[in-house]
Image (tube, grey):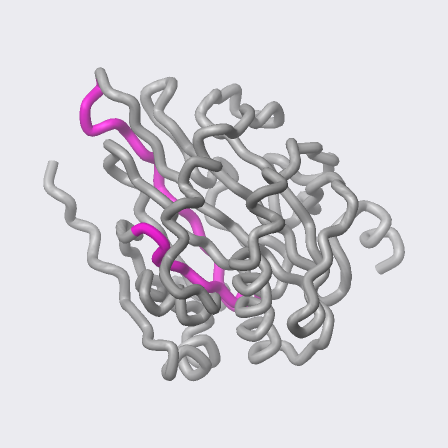
């Protein structure tokens, strides 16, 4: 079946503030992502970190298609501080499938979190978030994902179209190997308006103002049923008012 998904609607770095202000989302190609993140070039040498991910033990649909790691950071200007390893938690209002439970994923590889390019990437994203919602301090959660086709199909967003309960969501496409599908869909929360496209270029980036849009990615399937196939992403969320957690909800 031919690929009928439109190409991503790319935004330049100069146009990024206006695009986020008007549309609530933007897509950057790899070269523009590198400039935003302060990288001399996209970090192709990070790819092997995605080859050593433990299975997600919390999938409630019974699937075996997701592997991941997780880490948390506080970003104040150029200062990046890794916080002690903690659970990932979302309210059911934002994740009806996996919300309301503490999910303890394995931590990020130390070599990744300690890389100077990691810190500059978080600082660049905090700058985008501050352009949308003025704040000096940001609470960032990073998720290293691999979705594979172990059971014939993999679901990047098993919870369906959703928001994350944060201020900014950044989805980096790290790699696609032998897969079809995985189309990204972004919808305005106020109505049916939306766009669809497929991220294909390694280190291209989708940025989302989480208050204004909902998003999902369609399932993936292998191009060749006899060959391994996967889609790797890095998802970083930033929030102004602390990390999400049950205690934060009780005090709200």
* Magenta residue check for 219: yes
Q: Residue at x 32, y 66 (%)?
A: 31
Residue 86 place in picture, x, y as percent = 76, 41
Residue 33 versus residue 246 in the image, above or below? below
Nearer to the camera, 26 or 77? 77
Q: Tell me if 109 is positioned left or right of 192 in this view.
A: right
Residue 49 place in picture, x, y as percent = 48, 37
Q: Residue at x 67, y 40 (%)?
A: 99
Q: Tell me if 179 is positioned left or right of 160 in this view.
A: left
Q: Is residue 193 visible?
A: no
Residue situated furthest left in the rendering = 2
Q: Residue at x 46, y 71 (%)?
A: 24
Q: Residue at x 41, y 74 (%)?
A: 23
Q: Tell me if 157 is positioned left or right of 114 in this view.
A: left
Residue 198 place in picture, x, y as percent = 28, 51
Report the magenta residues as a range.
202-225
Q: Is residue 71 visible?
A: yes
Which quadrant would the C terminus be assigned to in this image? bottom right
Residue 59 place in picture, x, y as percent = 56, 27
Residue situated furthest right in the rendering = 251
Which quadrant would the N terminus be assigned to in this image? top left
| Location of residue 42 (image quadrant) | bottom left
Q: Tell me if 39 is positioned left or right of 163 in this view.
A: left
| Location of residue 39 (image quadrant) | bottom left
Nearer to the camera, 182 or 35? 35
């Amino acid at each position: 079946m031919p690929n009928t998904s439109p190409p991503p609607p790319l935004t330049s770095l100069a146009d990024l503030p206006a695009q986020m202000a008007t549309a609530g989302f933007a897509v950057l190609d790899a070269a523009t992502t590198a400039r935003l993140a302060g990288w001399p070039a996209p970090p192709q040498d990070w790819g092997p970190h995605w080859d050593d991910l433990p299975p997600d033990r919390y999938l409630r649909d019974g699937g075996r298609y997701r592997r991941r790691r997780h880490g948390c950071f506080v970003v104040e200007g150029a200062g990046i501080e890794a916080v002690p390893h903690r659970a990932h938690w979302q309210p059911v209002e934002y994740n009806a499938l996996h919300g309301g439970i503490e999910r303890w994923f394995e931590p990020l590889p130390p070599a990744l979190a300690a890389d100077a390019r990691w810190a500059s990437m978080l600082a660049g994203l905090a700058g985008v978030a501050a352009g949308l919602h003025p704040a000096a301090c940001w609470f960032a959660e990073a998720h290293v994902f691999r979705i594979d086709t172990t059971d014939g199909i993999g679901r990047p967003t098993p919870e369906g179209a959703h928001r994350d309960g944060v201020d900014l969501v950044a989805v980096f496409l790290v790699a696609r190997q032998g897969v079809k599908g995985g189309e990204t869909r972004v919808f305005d929360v106020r109505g049916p308006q939306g766009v669809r496209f497929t991220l294909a270029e390694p280190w291209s980036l989708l940025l989302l103002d989480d208050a204004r849009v909902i998003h999902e990615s369609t399932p993936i399937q292998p191009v060749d049923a006899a060959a391994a196939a996967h889609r790797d992403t890095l998802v970083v969320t930033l929030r102004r008012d602390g990390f999400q957690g049950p205690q934060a909800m009780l005090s709200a």
